[in-house]
Amino acid sequence: MPSEKNISYDPFDAPEQGGRFDWGERLHHYYFLSKRLVRRFWWILLVAVLAGVAVQGYSELQKEPVYVSQASMIVSGRIALPENVYREELSHFFGTQIDLMMSPRVQNQAHERVEMLNPELERSWVNLHAAQKPQTSIFILRASGGSPSYTRAFLNAVMEEYQNFRRDMRAQTSENTLLAITEQLYRLEEEIDVQEEAVEAFQKRNNLVFLKEQGSAAGSYLAQLKNNQAEMRTRLLILENLSESNPADLAAAGSIDADDVIEIGRTGRNDPLPEAQEQLRRLKAERDEFARYLRPRHPKMLDLESEIERAENLLEILRRQTVQQVGERKTALQRQITNLDSVIEQWEHTALEISRLSAEFERLRSRLDRSRSTYQRLLDSIQSININQQLEQETVEVMEYASAARAAPIEVRRKMAEGGAIGLLAGVAFVALIGFLDTRIITTEDLRNRFEYPVLGTMPEEDRGVGGDVVALKLKDERHLFGEACRTLRSSLFFQKNQKGERPRTFVVTSAIPEEGKSTIALNLAIAFSFTSARTLLLDTDLRRGRINDMLGLPSRPGLSDVLSRETEWNSAIRKTEHASMDFLAHGGHTERPGELLLGPRFPALLEELKAEYDFIICDSAPILAADDTVGFAGGVDSVLLAVRSNFTLARQVKGSLERLANRHIPVSGFILNCADTRGADYYYHYHHKYDQEEPVATP
């Protein structure tokens, strides 16, 4: 049987079931736990606060007098000279200067300065504080020490040493810069000498004037060659586009001139091919004219046919000559273009070589010019640094020297307040640690998070009457929360079902340890059942320390032990109570063997007899961890209820009780949380909801 969940005690570690995480409930839960811790351990907080106040107040009163001197420095303007090359980082200027003022180096030098200038002053401890005055360029320096004279002298020495440190830093920076620039100048001089020798050697190897003229001539001649080549390619393209089968192209080709092919077809000369073509057209026209009047065999027609045949033969001869002439011209042009390619390639190589030499000379001269320019800038920088050293301007100057040191007021109240705050924090931490280590059950949520059994009811904490017992429930009880808690527990049990689906009729109310209020719960639960007119028997089975009879004002004998010992019958041992439907059977006389009596066969038989007479039987039993009596007979009842007292019972005690019951295979119906704080989470919603109601009259 499971006894404890593997879940953390912290409610924040418990997952919310069936909804989102409720921060309001968690905060209220922590608020409730905090109030309980404060109510329990308020004296720890009080002692911690008083201890902190006492310690801080005593330490402040025992302190030696502290003397305070104050001075100020200002960031002044300066004339912006063009030669002023020294710059400081301005983005973090004020923070840097404050760190310099408070640096160990400046303070050590200030101590040495005071000892050297004022040997009569005995060295004393001094604390220095520097800060920037808000929204100004002013530094406020404050020194506190044990000697007024030494404190004032030390503060003045700090300002002097701070300014000396800045001057030394500026001088060191200038010297380092001069050294670096000088080394760079020496290196540049060597580079300039090497570059000048390279330029001079290049000029000796190459005539620059001749190179420039040769480059211009080569470019012009190369452009002319490329133009001629392009013209020849155009002529060749025209010849290649001529068609041998086109008479017009052949006519144009017939006028080709070896020296002027561009003028083909546009010359006015009497070329043979056009004239032959014109004569052939004329003869054919005459033949067509005479054919209308003359017969084909007419001598005139025959002469014309002969002349036409001769003209066509002449035209064919001229055409073949023209085609041959065009082919020879194309071959000549291709040969000329090929020759020009070789010539152009040679001149391009010459032009590229001239360009390369010119570019090399320009590169050498450019490097030389850059080196000379850099050299001149470095010379100007050296001159500016020298002038800056001569015209040194300090930007942070003393505005007010150290004032006369005065004794600082003793801040007893502030120190005591600080001590109280520190003590309070320590006390809260200690109380929180106690609460974290405390595993006592406080709320129903603790039970649900730790164990798998349901919480059947929550009984509020009530004032105890005469004898230290809670006054029993009444029909018209003015304790609304208490009455509703008893009725809620009764309803939870009234509608329970066991494994067989039957309603339980016999109940055992027990607890892990004594003083958890199980007897009070059993009594009030029996009274609540009796309000429904159900016949109810309250049975005190705590044969060792039973006390319900005292709470009811009835005698303890005869009782259960007498019945089990067969000294009397149960009919005569049962007592009537002030509640009509409720009877009571006391524990009886004390016996040396209570466990054996409850474990024997007589008690189960008695329960069966009583169940025939009563609707419900409520048994108050001994604590489980205190005695073995309860686990001996609890297996014979219908329902076992485990009472847990809030802020009293430890979780390990509940776990031990559940393990003992589980070892005997005794099922637990659930928990009853007793003495719950009505101001806590379990009664958060009951403050403004109180109702008066009549008890229902019903028989189960």
Image (cartoon, grey):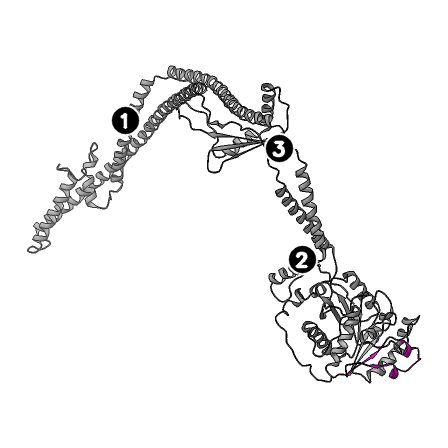
Dividing the picture into quadrants, the one containing residue 452 is bottom right
Q: Are marks 2 and 3 in contact (CB under 8 Å)?
A: no
User: In the rendered structure, does residue 336 fall within the stretch colored magenta?
Assistant: no
- N-terminal of the pair, mark 2 or mark 1, is 2
User: In this figure, which residue is indicated by the disc labeled 3?
Assistant: 66
Secondary structure beneath dot 2 equals: helix
**What residue type is disc 1 on?**
Ser
**What residue type is disc 3 on?**
Val
Quarter that holds the C terminus? bottom right
Quarter that holds the N terminus? bottom right
Q: Are marks 3 and 1 in contact (CB under 8 Å)?
A: no
Q: CA distance from mark 2 to mark 3?
A: 43 Å
Q: CA distance from mark 2 to mark 1?
A: 104 Å
Front position in the image: 512 or 317: 512
User: In this figure, which residue is indicated by the disc labeled 1?
Assistant: 220
Q: Which residues are magenta?
A: 561-586
Secondary structure beneath dot 3 equals: loop
Q: Is residue 501 visible?
A: no
User: In this figure, which residue is indicated by the disc labeled 2?
Assistant: 34
Camera-nearest label, 3 or 1: 3
Secondary structure beneath dot 1 equals: helix
User: In the rendered structure, does residue 562 fall within the stretch colored magenta?
Assistant: yes
Dividing the picture into quadrants, the one containing residue 487 is bottom right
Camera-nearest label, 2 or 1: 2
Is 700 positioned to the left or the right of 81 in the image?
Answer: right
Q: CA distance from mark 3 to mark 1?
A: 98 Å
Dividing the picture into quadrants, the one containing residue 475 is bottom right
**Circle 1 residues within 10 Å: few <14, some 14–19, many ≥20:** few
